[in-house]
Amino acid sequence: MVVDAPTYPMALSAIQGASCRPVSVALPQQGWDCDGLAATIAQTAPRLAWLMPDFHNPTGRCMDSATRQRVADIAAQTRTTLVADETMVDLWYDAPPPPPLAAFNPDAPVITIGSAGKSFWGGLRIGWIRASSRTIASLVQARDSLDLGSPLLEQLACCWLLENEHRLLPSRRAMLATRRDMCGALMAEYFPHWHFTPPEGGLSFWVELPGMLATLFSVRAESRGIHIGTGTRFGLAGAFDRYLRLPFTLSDDELRSAFTTLQPLWHSLTEQKESFRLRKII
């Protein structure tokens, strides 16, 4: 199965847990690499390609219309089924996303998956799938062998939330946009050497460090009660050790408190690295 690199770690776990082999296509500094996707599909002939076009996790970027058209055309030409994860589709801050990936080429086989968890509340574990009637029928048969269905109360709650999303989501987006901006300002203040692009949507920053220090830094942060997602979780074979995923969902006071705790840990780590480098030179 083709995936982005980086990509959501639980997707990698699910793919590998199903005895499938993920093959990654590296994301460039901006957007998606359509030529790389086409070449990888041509070389590996995958059954599926799992993509997150709407506020990609962990980068927060959104696939533009031209790229969606190109990706859909590639899928149609190669008969590769696209699995489009729309989990973050409602969490846009600067501009709403383009139409769904499935709308760009009627001949492209697309399975679209969504969830209420990110849009409304993480404890609401209700999701859905949009696909052809034949695919849905196969999925229903497979589901019967796993459990008896989702709890009715949660389904009713989800239906109410979806019916009232026009009243609920604008305030949630406004709150998260404010926290995104505050988190970015605090990072620039406390960690001026970190590099990041403000995400267009989603719930986190994808931060590039000045060295391959993410794992070491996360271990030190964990010792102070702060959990940080290291970049290595979002790639294959230990890639992305110079990246961190930092959520911005906490309040301003909580974010500042966390950065105040993290700053001396970072300074200590970089000073040790520089001291070791100088000793090697001497």
Image (cartoon, grey):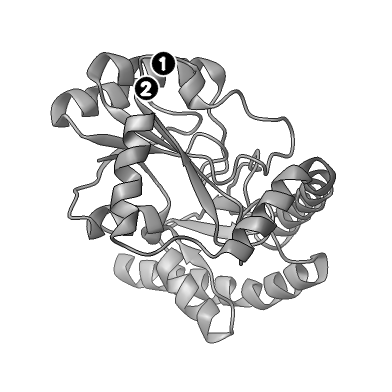
Amino acid tagged 1: Arg
Front in this rendered view, residue 194 or 225 = 225
- From this view, report whether residue 233 is shown above or below residue 269: above
- From this view, report whether residue 37 is shown above or below residue 152: above
Say what secondary structure mark 2 lies in: helix
Front in this rendered view, residue 95 or 158 = 158
Which residue is located at x 84 percent, y 45 percent? 167
Amino acid tagged 2: Cys
- From this view, report whether residue 71 is shown above or below residue 273: above
Where is residue 70 shown, x and y percent of the image?
41, 16
Instruction: Report which quarter residue 98 is drawn in.
Output: top right
Viewed as shown, does residue 55 lie left or right of 32? right
First in sequence, mark 1 or 2: give its number: 2
Which residue is located at x 21 percent, y 34 percent? 47
Quadrant for the C terminus, please: bottom left
Mark 2 crowd level (few <14, some 14–19, many ≥20, 10 Å Cα): some
Between the C-alphas of marks 1 and 2, the distance is: 7 Å
- The reply to whether residue 228 is visible in this rendering is yes
Question: Decide: marks 1, 2 in contact (CB < 8 A)?
Answer: yes
Which residue is located at x 51 percent, y 19 percent? 103
Query: Mark 2 sits on what residue?
Result: 34
Instruction: Report which quarter residue 242 is drawn in.
Output: bottom left
Where is residue 21 shown, x and y percent of the image?
19, 48
Viewed as shown, does residue 273 lie left or right of 181? left
Say what secondary structure mark 1 lies in: helix
